[in-house]
Amino acid sequence: MKLIRLWIVERFVEEKQGFTMEEVAEEYLNELVNRSLIQVAEMNHFNRVKKCRVHDLMREIILLKSREESLVMIANGTRISKNEKVRRLSIRENSEEVQSDMRFPYLWSFLSFSSHHSFEHGFRNYKLLRVLNLDRAPFSCFPPELVELIHLRYLSLRWTMIRELPESIRKLKYLEILDLKGSTVSSLPSGITQLTCLCQIRNYRYSYQSSLFFPDTLGMRVPSGIGRLTSLQKLGSVEVNEDNESVRELGKLTQLRRLGILKLREEQGMDLCYTLERLKHLTAMYLVSLNQTDVLQLDSISSPPKYLQRLYLKCSLSALPGWIASLQYISKLVLQYSNLKSDPLKALQKLPSLAVLELRQAYAGEELFCDPGGFSKLKRLGLHELERLQRIRIAKGSMPGLERLDITACTVLETVPDGIENLKNIEDLVLWEMPSTFIKTVERSRGEDFWRVQHITTITRIYESRGRWVSETLL
């Protein structure tokens, strides 16, 4: 996706009516894959390219032609002349041939993936820069000269130690993508509301304070007036205030495709429903309550975003909202802290596109059951910290495409799911912090249920010992 974002800000992608720029760019990528110009290194659970590469011979041709045409320069040990006309420059960890005092007056794009490169001479001589990627750059504060790069469309400060952005960031009026993932920026200045070209504000980082197994997402506060950024399509991990207006204002961002809201309170439920009904184009939504016990009332949504593909609900629920079962395009669903009384598999098993389902402290019952034909597209199922769960029954003919099953800290679960022997495509069974009595039931030599799991390619046990995680293969 980072490759696609760079294509977009470089204007390599043409607009196409009815499609977002990212959708068009993904078409380009798939076409290159189909022509064998790009090789797929990894696919995700949704049959989309996650990682890609080019053949080494193709790469050499690309590097040669790119340098001849002054299209891009990869600093990989090749000497760079100070008089060379460089339009795009990429440097890695050990790119010693790029000296900090070198001048590139024609530079449009600068991509740094180095945590050691010196920027002592700053960016004052790069007045034409449109793309600036400073992933892991050794900055502890925002370089003030960056706001003078008035042509910037893309700015990435991923994994830097920068804590705050200046008010003067309002000068970057053409900025389209601001990437703060993994940085320590905890709030945005009010000047950000003047950047009306912004399409994406990306930020999230993780903490493991409340769970050994699943990280908490840390967000950022946004200023009043964020609703002016009506071109925004992605806004990640926003921490809302106690007042209801901060939730309702997000409803003005009607072009949003991806939204994360943190620190939601019970009393904000109605305003949240109002906001979500206005965001018709959402494809990914991440909602987190302030406290695990806060119940978010989401049943008032009469017209949910029908194109939702990924939904994360980290909050207590009085019941599973009925509209979830109507989401025809939902491919990933994560429920955490839901504490549901009724079996969620019953309500979700007819979803036609669901590929990944995770239940994390989400069910307070003793049994889970899936009917024949249920979960026709499911590839990955995670059952985590379901403290009262004793039995799982999977009817023959359900979950036909399941590839991986994770079971984590279900301390009273008696044995592997009844019917797991019918899941012919399952490749991985991962058991996290499961009791030794459970583990013994699937051991090769004496496990009474080994016959149920002997067709699985890999069975992995992961447990904590002396303060560290230990992984061992049972099969």
Image (spheres, rainbow, N blue to C red):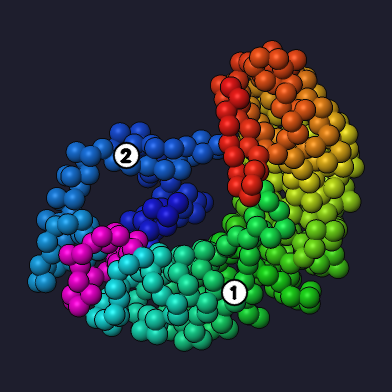
Residue 329, position in %: x, y? 64, 41
Q: Secondary structure at mark 1?
A: loop
Q: CA distance from mark 2 to mark 1?
A: 38 Å
Q: Residues within 10 Å of mark 1 (few under 14, many from 20)?
A: some
Q: Nearer the viewer, residue 448 or 195?
A: 448
The residue singled out by tag 2 in the image is 38
Foreground of the two, 17 or 300: 300
In this picture, which residue range is highlighted in magenta? 90-114
x 55%, y 65%: residue: 203
- Lateral position of residue 437 relative to residue 354, left or right: right
Does 325 lie within the magenta span? no
Q: Position of residue 124 (x, y in %)?
A: 28, 83
Circle 1 sits on which residue? 186
Q: Position of residue 387 (x, y in %)?
A: 83, 41
Query: Is residue 178 left or right of 80 when viewed as pictured?
Result: right
| Quarter of the picture holding the C terminus | top right
Q: Secondary structure at mark 2?
A: loop
In the image, residue 139 sits, relative to residue 359, either above or below, namely below
In-image side of 103 versus 141 (left or right): left
Magenta run includes residue 104 = yes
Residue 103 in view here = yes
Using a 10 Å C-alpha cutoff, classify the residue at mark 2 as few (fewer than 14 neighbours), some (14 to 19) or many (20 or more): some
- Residue in the picture at 77% in, 43% down: 385
**Label 2 is placed on what type of residue?**
Ile
Q: What amino acid is at disc 1?
A: Ser
Please tell me whether mark 2 or mark 1 is closer to you in this view: 1
Answer above or below: position of 323 versus 139.
above
Where is residue 429 shown, x and y percent of the image?
63, 28
Comes first in the chain, label 2 or label 1: 2
